[in-house]
């Protein structure tokens, strides 16, 4: 891992958004190259890791895929606390999911890490004929809130790798590398906190 690279970075990444918007599907597409038409709803949260090599650094992502169902809302701070980046996901076929995404952004702005790198993913662009949220609308909102905006499809893989590469690049730019020993310590702490871990 990262032998050729001069910089090894471990970064916690969290995905937030309404239920059914495709958070798990985006992560599964990125981590395993898989997609399921009938993806089960996440309970609590799921944990994944993926290593991504850039020219300038190797990023090891610790990815928390949170559950979108409202009953799990109170668990969210546990997952976004200490995160380097957050991806707020909505479904372009659901205006309600876009409204919910805005609520997540507000919560992150108020309670998240002030240096948190924010991405807005407008997912399910393969369902263009059912679109309810215009691309300009999402883009405008992202711009106003200092977020990077991407339209994605976990189904066709459109912009999925791009999303994670963009996040990695932003993380590499903002974070200096740390000695390996410290990273291991952090990892152990994360694991202890992972009460709902189900990779
Ligand atoms: N057409 C299409 N369907 C998608 C896409 N992404 C996810 N889905 C479908 O949408 C449904 C919900 O996807 P999930 O990945 O479980 O959504 P989630 O946001 O993780 O949902 P929760 O775990 O309940 O919060 C599944 O049936 C997926 O197959 C996409 O890009 N295009």
Image (spheres, grey):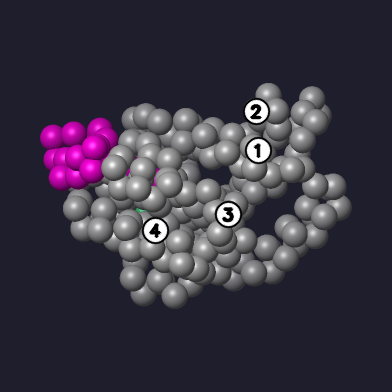
Can you see residue 26?
no
Q: Secondary structure at mark 4?
A: helix
Magenta region:
120-137
Neighbor class of circle 4 (other Cα within 10 Å; few <14, some 14-19, many 20+) is: many
> Marks 1/3: CA distance?
13 Å
Res 139 quadrant in image = top left
Q: Where does residue 80 sit, x and y in percent of width and height?
A: 53, 62
Q: Earlier in the sequence, mark 1 or mark 3?
A: 3
Q: Nearer the viewer, mark 3 or mark 4?
A: 3
Q: Earlier in the sequence, mark 1 or mark 4?
A: 4
Mark number, residue 115: 3
Q: Circle 1 is placed at which residue position?
A: 172
Q: Secondary structure at mark 3?
A: loop
Q: Earlier in the sequence, mark 4 or mark 2?
A: 2
Q: Where does residue 5 sit, x and y in percent of width and height?
A: 77, 28
> Marks 3/4: CA distance?
14 Å
Q: Is residue 168 placed above or below 190 in the rendered structure?
A: above
- Tags 3 and 4 in contact by the CB under 8 Å rule? no
Can you see residue 93?
yes
- Tags 2 and 1 in contact by the CB under 8 Å rule? yes
Q: Circle 4 is placed at which residue position?
A: 105
> Marks 2/3: CA distance?
21 Å
Mark number, residue 54: 2
> Marks 2/1: CA distance?
9 Å
């Amino acid at each position: 891992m990262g032998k050729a690279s001069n910089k090894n970075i471990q970064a916690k990444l969290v995905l937030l958004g309404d239920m059914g918007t495709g958070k798990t599907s985006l992560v599964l597409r990125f981590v395993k190259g898989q997609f399921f038409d009938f993806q089960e709803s996440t309970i609590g949260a799921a944990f994944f890791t993926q290593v991504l090599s850039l020219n300038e650094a190797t990023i090891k992502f610790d990815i928390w895929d949170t559950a979108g169902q409202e009953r799990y809302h109170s668990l969210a701070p546990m997952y976004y606390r200490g995160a380097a980046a957050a991806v707020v996901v909505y479904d372009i076929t659901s205006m309600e999911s876009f409204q919910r995404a805005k609520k997540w952004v507000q919560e992150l702005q108020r309670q998240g890490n002030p240096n948190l790198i924010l991405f807005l993913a407008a997912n399910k662009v393969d369902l263009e004929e059912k679109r309810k949220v215009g691309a300009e609308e999402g883009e405008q909102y992202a711009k106003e809130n200092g977020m990077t905006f991407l339209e994605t499809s976990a189904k066709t893989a459109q912009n999925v790798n791009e999303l994670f590469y963009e996040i990695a690049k932003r993380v590499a730019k903002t974070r200096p590398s740390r000695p390996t020993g410290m990273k291991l310590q952090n990892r152990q702490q994360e694991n202890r906190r992972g009460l709902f871990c189900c990779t």
